[in-house]
Image (cartoon, grey):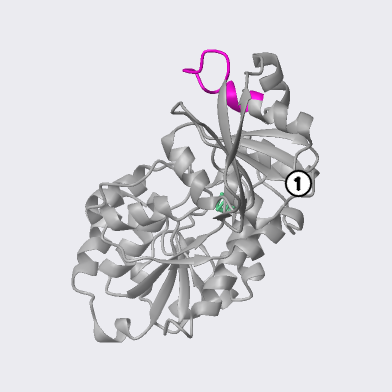
Amino acid sequence: MDNQMIIRLDKKADFLAMDNMKKHKAIALFSGGLDSILTVKWMQKCGYAVHPVFFRAPYFKAERALQSADKNGIELEVVDISPEHIQLLSSSAYGFGRRLNPCIDCHGLMFRKAGELLAARDADYLISGEVLGQRPKSQRRDALDSVRRLSGLKDLIVRPLSQLLLPETKPVREGWIDRTHLLAINGRGRSVQHRLAQELGVMDYPSPAGGCLLTDRNYCLRLQDLIDNQELTLENLELLGNGRHFRLAKDLKLIVGRDEQDNLALENEFQNGIRLQARDYMGPLGLLVGRRPEPAELKLALQIFMSFHTKVPARAAVQMQNFIHGLPQETPWETESGKASQDVVKTYHISYN
Ligand code: SF4
């Protein structure tokens, strides 16, 4: 699609807030990325009612999407699909992308969950910002078709940015959407999207990378460690995106915050285990999660934890406190600890770095 075509459609869109077009409402799958912003803004500009939804799981949290929606004047509903999505990590029908990202099953699940919301949101069909050919595996023509089949709602899905190149579905057939409002963007280039962004006044959008941790190399190493140790629980996954992680034993891990933001995120998600904090020094938060440590394991954990306290000369007191279901238990207790060597730290660190 060239620039002229966008302009032509844009002019048409200016006078198309017609009554019959407002009778049907779309639920939009919103990721916070440029294509999903353009899809929502374009359809709204053409006069259609759109209800954008972000589906969250522990490895794609809502903050980025909420910020992106806010900056672009989009009202967003957030729906948690963690339990269903975690299942995909062990039973993905279409397999994984470059890392542990089951993109085809993930999109199928999101459409299915969006479909379950149709009646409650008084909506009739589903839209998304997928662009034909944009991603080598998950946005090929056959992959888009697999997503439609997985969703169980294949006749109700419209991809406005590429729909002119895809099979027609009910919302177009029945005239809920005017065909001239649909676009034919195709391929990996981004220039058409950037021009459309300019025309729609979309100035602020996040970079394409960074939305889903299932495509992050180090995160996936930590995730694989959870899978290998049969610890794939929601509680463990909520802690996995922040901090440095150390595997001390099969069912025992140490997590150490990297910075203040990490500490805050870990503190918010921490439910069960032992919380570690240097008594007299500012520094990272430590969490021991899993079973109760043996004395030698606790000693090792404290030494690794203290090695991230640059201001501690050699030894210092560490305060510990048990937490159950996010609540502190008995009075904190403390002990002195030295630091582990860098070799020991590396041995237990779950990281490629
Ligand atoms: S990158 Fe992540 S959020 Fe996006 S489709 Fe793949 S698994 Fe789902």
Q: Is-magenta flag for residue 314?
A: yes
Q: Is-magenta flag for residue 60?
A: no
* Of residues 164 and 331, the one drawn nearer to the viewer in this rendering: 331
Task: Tell me what residue is drawn at x 48 percent, y 45 percent.
Answer: 265
Judged left or right of residue 292, residue 12 is left
* Secondary structure category for the residue under label 1: loop
Q: How many numbered tags mark residues here?
A: 1
Residue 162 pos. (x, y %): 45, 59
In the figure, residue 8 lies in which quadrant? bottom left
Where the C terminus falls, by quadrant? top right
In the figure, residue 151 lies in which quadrant? bottom right
Task: Tell me what residue is drawn at x 32 percent, y 66 percent.
Answer: 75
> Does residue 316 appear anywhere in the picture?
yes
Residue 320 pos. (x, y %): 59, 39
Residue 11 pos. (x, y %): 20, 64
Task: Tell me what residue is drawn at x 61 percent, y 37 percent.
Answer: 255
Residue 323 pos. (x, y %): 61, 51
> In the rendered image, which residue does mark 1 sit on?
291
Local crowd size for mark 1, using a 10 Å CA cut-off: few (<14), some (14–19), many (≥20): some
Q: Amino acid at mark 1?
A: Arg
Judged left or right of residue 349, residue 170 is left
The residue stretch that appears in magenta? 303-315
* Of residues 155 and 268, the one drawn nearer to the viewer in this rendering: 268
* Of residues 46 and 223, the one drawn nearer to the viewer in this rendering: 223
Task: Tell me what residue is drawn at x 66 percent, y 36 percent.
Answer: 254
> Does residue 99 appear anywhere in the picture?
no
Can you say whether 24 is above or below 282 in the image? below
